[in-house]
Image (spheres, helix red, strand yellow):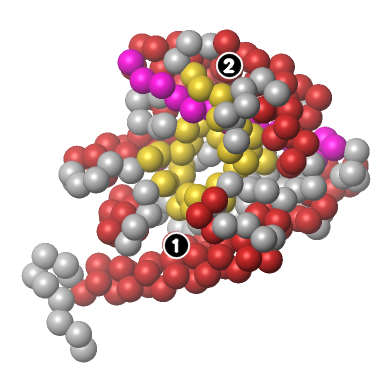
Amino acid sequence: MSQTSSSEPDGSARRREELAGNLAEVRNRIEAACAAAARDAGEVTLIAVTKTWPAADVLLLRELGVADFGENKDQEAAPKAAEVAAAGGPPVRWHFVGQLQTNKASSVARYAEFVHSVDRGRLVRSLGGAARRAGRELTCLVQVNLAATAAITAAAAAATANVAGQARGGAPIGDLQQVAEAIEAEPGLVLGGVMAIAPLGVPPEQAFAPLHSCSLAIRAVRPQAMIISAGMTGDLEAAIANGATHVRIGTALLGDRRPPVR
């Protein structure tokens, strides 16, 4: 059995080894997907989605070179971000990737640097006010509802209405530019790009096909808004093939999700 330092219990050492192996596999998948798409792997940012996992895992992944972390519920993300900050060391970038209620905007604005799920004007205004009060600048992505595209059948769209008890949300493609313009006009916010989740029941290659046109709609408002946030454990290859610059990986990196704490 390998020796561990007194400051690193055996359990922590085993978890670090597990995360390191998973991270290597995920990075290999990203590199292979980029090679297949004739893209540079350096164009793709890995976001470790740590929902239901402890701050200790964030710290271990940070040691392993991960700098970007995603959360989808403020009640879990806010204390986790505070715990990571209190531990010291290099700062990490927090991405809020879940559906966001306006009454949580003030809390999210205190720790997140990116909000991926902006899909309506009221949320834009709430985040802008929260960012200004916090003296911070938030990069916002417009979430597009890919299930509303003509290429997706009504049956598949219905299947996306609820995932693990939480609606996926997103603005219709026709509303993307309107939401983007609202973000661009809101002090305290920066328009960063587009975010999408593949609808259930649809081949990911088909689901992600509109990403390029969605990105063009956002970049018509702000040319520098180049982020395309798409792709998770099961479909990162299809997302990268369709231009994803940020992939949001949970299960492949951290393991099967823990039951939520109630």
Percent position (x, y) of residue 83?
25, 42
Residue at figure coordinates x 28%, y 59% from the top left: 63
- Does the stretch in magenta take in 198? no
Would residue 230 be found to the left or right of residue 26 on screen? right
Residue at figure coordinates x 56%, y 62% from the top left: 30
Percent position (x, y) of residue 79?
31, 37
The disc at residue 60 is none
Residue at figure coordinates x 63%, y 57% from the top left: 39
Would residue 253 be found to the left or right of residue 212 on screen? left
Name the element at disc 2.
Answer: helix
Percent position (x, y) of residue 251?
52, 61
Residue at figure coordinates x 18%, y 44% from the top left: 88
Q: Nearer the viewer, mark 1 or mark 2?
A: 2
Magenta region, residue range: 135-149
Viewer-side residue, 10 vs 236 = 236
- Does the stretch in magenta take in 145? yes
Q: Quadrant of the C terminus?
A: top left
Residue denoted by label 1: 254
Viewer-side residue, 22 vs 9 = 22
**Residue pushed farthest bottom?**
1
The amino acid marked with disc number 1 is: Leu
Would residue 16 be found to the left or right of residue 101 on screen? left
The amino acid marked with disc number 2 is: Glu
Q: Quadrant of the N terminus?
A: bottom left
Percent position (x, y) of residue 203?
80, 57
**What separation in Å lies between label 1 and label 2 (alpha carbons)?**
35 Å
Q: Residues within 10 Å of mark 2 (few under 14, many from 20)?
A: some
Residue denoted by label 2: 184
Is residue 1 visible in the rendered structure shown here? Answer: yes
